[in-house]
Amino acid sequence: MPDQGASQGAGLEARIARLEAESQIRQLVARYSFDIDDRRTDAVRALFADDAVLRSHDGVMHAAGPDAIMAQFDGRFAVLGPGHHVMHDIQIDFVDEAHATGRVAGHAELMRHGKMMVAAIRYDDRYRKTDAGWKFAERVIGFLYYVPVEAYPGILARPDRNHAYAEPKLADYPERLPDWIAYEEAHRA
């Protein structure tokens, strides 16, 4: 007859391991924000797996591997001044003990090309447990808006809410999301 206490202990151990993994992933996300804002480039590099990808939904950013990712950050830092990234909600879904996916919602206040800007950000992440702990395997950034502060009032009334570039671009979400599109099509009068 199986030892019931042993099986409950194994279940408890697995639950504790899952909670510890979730905590470590949350720390990874927090470190990213602090390290980016503080320009701690060695610390930023350490957040990514050896084969990690960092890209944006709009296709402007795409880097594979830590060297390319850091070169991409150097390019971004060249046009960015001080910034403050704040992550609000983190949804973590475990695939198995060594892989997870996540969605992270946040905001940023930053200087870009000498202009004060605000952004609403969403990251689609893949995390991997490595010998050195949990790392980003993939990070994809999208923007609800990215605008100079004077353009913020009423920005959600227009579709071209990404003003990070010379010409405004369409926002990455929600209007491009399949569920948003399906809902809008189903409820058109």
Image (tube, rainbow, N blue to C red):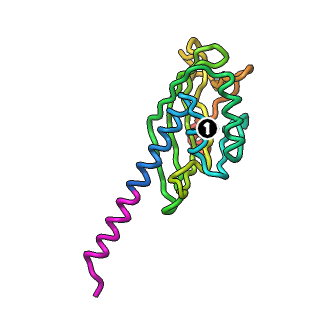
Q: Position of residue 63 (x, y in %)?
A: 71, 42
Residue 120 relative to residue 71: left or right: left
Q: Judging from the image, what secondary structure is the residue with disc 1 in?
A: strand
Question: Residue 139 at x, y = what percent?
Answer: 61, 44
Q: Quadrant of the N terminus?
A: bottom left
Q: Residue furthest front?
A: 42
Magenta residues span 1-18
Q: Residue at x 52, y 60 (%)?
A: 98
Let me know if residue 124 is in the magenta part: no
Amino acid carrying label 1: it is Ile
Q: Residue at x 65, y 52 (%)?
A: 50
Q: Is residue 98 left or right of residue 181?
A: left
Label 1: how many residues lie within 10 Å, few (<14), some (14-19) or many (20+)? many
The residue located at (58%, 44%) in the rendering is: 46
| Pointer 1 residue | 141
- What residue occupies the far top of the structure in this picture? 150
Q: Position of residue 32 (x, y in %)?
A: 53, 38
Q: Quadrant of residue 82?
A: top right
Relative to 10, is 1 above or below?
Answer: below
Residue that appears at 39% across and 54% down: 20
Q: Is residue 13 magenta?
A: yes
The secondary structure that dominates the magenta segment is helix
Q: Quadrant of residue 147?
A: top right
In the picture shown, does residue 95 fall above or below 162? below
